[in-house]
Structure formats: C-alpha cells, structure tokens
Image: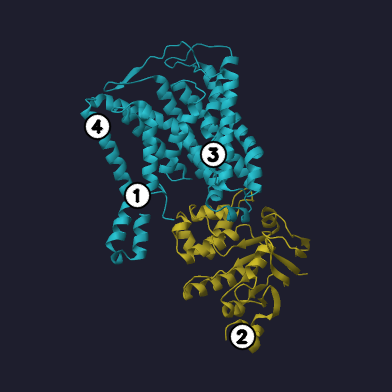
Chain colours: A cyan, B yellow
Amino acid sequence: MHDKRVLQDDGTLHLRPGERARAILTSRAFMFVVLALLVLGFIIAAQAKGVSANSLLSLFVRGTLLGGTLALGAIGVTLVFAVLKMANFAHGDTMTFGAYIGLLIIMLLPKGPPLAPFSFGYEFLVALLIVVPLIGLFTFGLDQALFRPLRNRRAQPIMFAMASLGLAFGLRSLVYIFWGADFTFYYVGRARPAVELFAGVRVRPDQLFILGLAIVLIVGVYLLLERTKIGKAMRATADNPDLARVSGIDTNRVILWTWLIGGGLAAAGGMLYALDVQLRPEMGWWLLLPLFASVILGTLGNAYGALAGAFIIGIVWQVSSAFINPTYGHGIAFLVMVLVLLVRPQGLFGGRK
Amino acid sequence: MPLLTVESVVSGYGEMQVLNGVSLTVGQNEIVSIVGPNGAGKSTVMKLVFGLLKPWEGAVTFNGQTISGMAPEKLVKLGLSYVPQVDNVFPNLTVEENLDMGGYTRSGSLDEQKERVYELFPRLAERRRQRAGKMSGGERQMVAMGRALMLDPKLLMLDEPSAGLAPLLVDMIFEKVADINKAGVAVLMVEQNAKKSLALADRGYVLATGQNKVDGPGQKLLADPEVARLYLGG
C-alpha cells in the first residue's frame, strides 16, 4: 500500500518504462512472488528426485518448528539493531551460552521423572525460568562493559561489529573450557519417541512444546511492545532516538529492557534448540547466518518482520533438504539473504528510504 | 522575574563558534519570536536552551534555576518542552502513542492531557490510531506540538513550526500557537516567516551572525524600516 502511494506522489502516469519495471521489481509483492517461486522450485526439484508429497509436508512442518526457535533469536537481533543501531554478532553464541547455563542448572537440580509425553522433567522448566532473566541481565552487563564505552566514544559501526564478534568468540571459548568440545544432551540416553501428528507427519511431543512456548514468548513480546509504556518507549527510541531524549525518555532504561528481552529470548531459543537437536558449542554460531537472513528478509529493526523472516527461512531451509544435502541448508539461508539484499534491501516490511 | 533568561551566551559545534554572545528573555505567558537570516544561529539558541549544546560562556536560567547543560529528562520535568524543526514525530508510532511518549515522565493517566490536545487539534482526535509517518506535513506538525504539550509545559519552544507548510496551514499553525499561549503557556519560537511570527509575538529578537541585532515589541520591529530592509527581506 505504501509503495503505491509513493508511486502516485511521483505521478504514476509519468513513469518511464524502465522506472516502472524497476518499481515493480523492488515491490514487496514481487519479493513475495520470488519467495513463492523459490519454494515452488524446491517442490518441483524434490518431485524430480522422487520425494513424496508426504515427506515434503513433514519437512514443511519441521521448518515451521525450526522457524519458532529462529524467531526467538531473530527478534533479539532486530531489537538490538533497532534501539542501539548495531549488528550483534554475539547473538548466536548468547543462545549457546544460555543453553549451556541451562544444562548446568539441570545438572545441579535433583533429577525428576520425565513429564510424559515430553522427554524432559521439571528441571528443564526450572532451568528455563532461571536462565531467561539471568542471560537477559548478563547481556545487559556485557553491553555496559563493552558496547556502552564505544557508544560514548561515538565509535564507527565496524567497531561494534568487531567487538560483538570478539564477544562471540569469547562466549564460545567459555563453553569449550567448561563443557568441552563434544556434543551432549540435556537428558543423555533418554528415549525421544515421535508421534503421528496428521497425514503421516511425525513429530516429537517436545517439538510441539518448543513451538508452543516460542509462540507464547512471541505473543508476550508483542504485548510488551504494543501495550506497555516501556515497550512503546523502546519503539519510540528505535524510531527517533533524538526525539525520544527530548521527550524525556530514559534511554538507559530502554537499553536495559532491550537486552533483557533480546538476551532472554536468545537464551530461551538456545535451550529450546538444544532440547530439539543437541547441545554443541558451535550451535549458536551456526545459527547466526539464518538469524541474520531472517532479520534482513523481514527488514532490519522490525520485530514483526524478523518473526515472518524466521518462519520463511526455517521453512525454506527444511524444504530444501528434500533435494539437496541438508548440510547446504545454510547456503539456502545465505541465498535468500543475498536475493533480498539485491532485489529489496529494505526487506519485506521496510518503506522506501 | 522572566521565565527564561539567556545571558551573553557563546557556544557552537565542535570547534565552530556559532553564538557570539546572545542574550534574551521570555516572560511568563509571553510569545517571543527569534528571526534573522539563515545561519544567524536561531536554531542553535533553541538547542542550547534545551541542553543539546553546552554554553562555552554565559548562562541559561529557567524560573531562577541554572539549567545550562541539564539533561532533557530533567528539563521536561521543570516545565520546558521543545519541538525540533525536522524529525519531530515518531513515524512508526500512532498519533496517540506519540502523545503518550510526550507524557513519558509522568506516571498515571494521561487521558486529561490527551483530551486537551485533541480539543486543540480535532484533526488528531479523528486520526488517533494512525501512524504519524503516514500523515501530511501539517498534521505532523500538530502531532509534534501535541506531544510537546503533554506535560503541561510552562514554556513551549518551537523551531520553525511553519517550515515547508502551505500558506493556509501556516496561518492555522500560528492561530494554534496563539491558542496555546492563551491557555497560559509561554512560547519561544524561531521562524523564517518573520513577518507573520513578529505580528503574533509580544516581543521579537533579530539575530544575525550569532549576535543580537535589534529587539523590541513585535509590531515595532515590523514597522521599523531599517529592520525590514536588513533582515526581513524588504
């Protein structure tokens, strides 16, 4: 709708053919068409390889599940970008770190029976409740120690990128030091049977829990951003930081809440991802590319865009594995990101700058 | 005692000195207009009063209290409020949310303040759920002024409120400034539209090259042929 209006202001009738073609190519609708064609292409390629419709459907469901966990990370990346105008490359490793702190808490707690039909016991839920605010505060602390001095010095964006990259390596090293390089599980050796959901699509009950919790958290963030005073102040600061200051908005409080939400959701995403797959020191690092692909696809700084982007990337990633080796999943996320940057760098939800 | 006093202030950006000794006062319930050619330092004075720049020399006092270099959140609590010339709304927030942000430092309900803003600008009441970024220039100026009125300021500072607006809207904005003033709010404004703003103002200051040139009652400045020739473009 917005794009149309811009066109009208320019005088639609007076557009030269080349300009008109360009306007169409960079429109949001065209971007959706490209994405739809991409998925269609995948399905045709899968058919050509003899993959059944049933397993395609399974992959679609699994992509949705993955999208939920990706969204928890992507919202944090985009909020931090919106409020602090920095790309936080440590976000993936924050997820890892949260997952491992969760493991520590689970090991410290007395072990209870699994909460059927799930594979985890009460310890996992307790750990989640502790880890989310803990990592939220932890990331705020890191911000104050590392990024705040850079902000006060009005450092270049590249300095923030490098600092967050260093932080990423630092967090991962801590995981290597304390837990080693091997993969592990929250509950080693515990069976995780799958049940049939519908039409032969099999999922583990854990995965439904993961998606459910992800949705609850996302709705919580939505309510916080739309309904609460601090949420509105966060959006205002993202929109126009100077006017926010002039209005008397306490910028430091906004920054605190940005990290509480961003870091907290990252930790939750990390624990849920680890519950679904496994704990590996590199898990978050490998999620960084799909996270940024989601955020760029959904427009940098737009929380709802990041959500949409995460589900699209999750689905595209999983469905692509029907016809190419799943290890290339990252390549697919990368491909989508490059496509968006070339065709519509402002993403699906961005206006024309 | 004047509400706001700026006393022989010298200031600027980085190494560049823009204000070379500016003095002005705004009394209780007065409309004061600063006019002058481009680059005279008009907007810089506004930024200085609002603590976005620090005075190198001189002092700024509000209600008898020194406010030089005070943080904006403290200034709004003292009853000072500022509408920048550009980027003066939150584009992705609705009209109502913009007003909420104007009242951020006040805890409790803002309904009464919002109602007053909607009374002043009925157009905003109709569009309260619309995003400010999708509104016209005139409507945005209303949102910006409405936001600044949410804390019942004693002094409203407007930086070029009529810039870029159609003539009809310019008149409307000046009428609203008069209405706001009648409700007991002192106004300090900077204007390119010197004739109209001086006609409205109780007093005016002509600024050039970062210094006071002439000051006096608005009508008197308008009638002064020397002022008109040198600073008001004929």
Q: Is residue A330 left or right of residue A16?
A: right
**Dot 3 and dot 4 residues touching (CB under 8 Å):** no
Q: Mark 1 lies on which chain?
A: A
Residue that mark 2 sits on: B228
- Front label number (1 vs 4): 4
Between the residue at mark 3 and the residue at mark 4, the CA separation in whole angstroms equals 36 Å
Tally of numbered discs: 4
User: Which residue type carries mark 1?
Assistant: Arg
- The residue that mark 3 highlights is A88
Is there CB contact under 8 Å for labels 4 and 2?
no
- Chain letter, disc 4 residue: A
Q: How far apart are marks 1 and 4 (CA)?
A: 26 Å
Query: Quick check: A99 left or right of A331?
Result: right
Q: Which amino acid does label 4 sit on?
A: Ala
User: Which label sits on residue A45?
Assistant: 4
Same chain assignment for discs 3 and 2: no
Which amino acid, mark 3?
Answer: Asn
Crowding near the residue tagged with mark 3, few <14, some 14–19, many ≥20 C-alpha atoms within 10 Å: many
Residue B75, image x and y in percent?
Answer: 69, 57
The CA distance from mark 1 to mark 2 is: 53 Å
Q: Which of marks 1 and 4 is nearer the N terminus?
A: 1
- Disc number placed over residue A28 in the picture, else none: 1
Quarter occupied by the N terminus of chain B: bottom right
